[in-house]
Amino acid sequence: NSSIIIQLLTIAIPALERLQKEGGEEGRKKIAAITRYTTVGIGLLQGFGYYMLIRAGSNGTSFLDDQSIWAAFVIVLTFTAGSAFVMWLGEQSTEFGIGNGISIILFAGIVARVPSMVQDMIAGVTYWTQRGELTLESLTSSGYSQEAAQQIIHSMIAPWEQVLNLIDMLAIV
């Protein structure tokens, strides 16, 4: 994510654009360093965001047994280290001539989600064509427990989302 952000910012910020065009090898190294720092910053923000998300939980119940500062530190550190590791993998891929490493990693992540997107689309279309509107009441009256019905509702994709997913998958190709 940070490499894409920095690439877009080099177009928007004249100083970064000059550094990229006129800086030569030294400019590329500075932009790579800026990208690394941005990656760490985004990792810190994402880690903190996920900590807050799982601390808040669902319906007022937290997913964390331990809500101490230590749990927050471990979650934030894990996200930051994971971001730095993926960035390093991308740099290694680029350095050894395999291609643009970060782009390849992002593409692989998108392609890996395609089967579950297709499965969710098929399940959603099947439900709506066979049973009509998807509501908690219609599922519980069909024999599902309250918890199972909520899981089904959260996993199904609405028809308008299916169109967006189809466009997304076509954009990949």
Image (cartoon, rainbow, N blue to C red):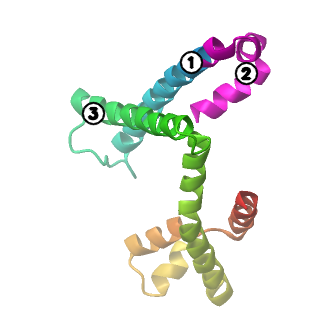
Q: Name the residue at the front extreme.
A: 96
Give me the residue at 65% from left, 34% from top.
4
Residue type for callout 1: Ile
Which residue in the protein does label 3 denote? 74
Residue 94 found in image quarter: top right
Element assignment for label 1: helix
Which residue in the protein does label 1 denote? 34
Which stretch appears magenta?
Answer: 1-28
Residue 163 as seen in the image, left or right of residue 70: right
Tell me the quarter of the image containing the C terminus. bottom right
- Percent x, y of residue 16: 71, 14
- Distance from Cα at disc 3 to Cα at disc 1: 25 Å
- Percent x, y of residue 62: 31, 46
Which residue in the protein does label 2 denote? 10
* 36 versus 91 height, above or below: above
Element assignment for label 2: helix
Residue type for callout 3: Val
Residue 131 found in image quarter: bottom right
- In primary-sequence order, the first of circles 3 and 1 is 1
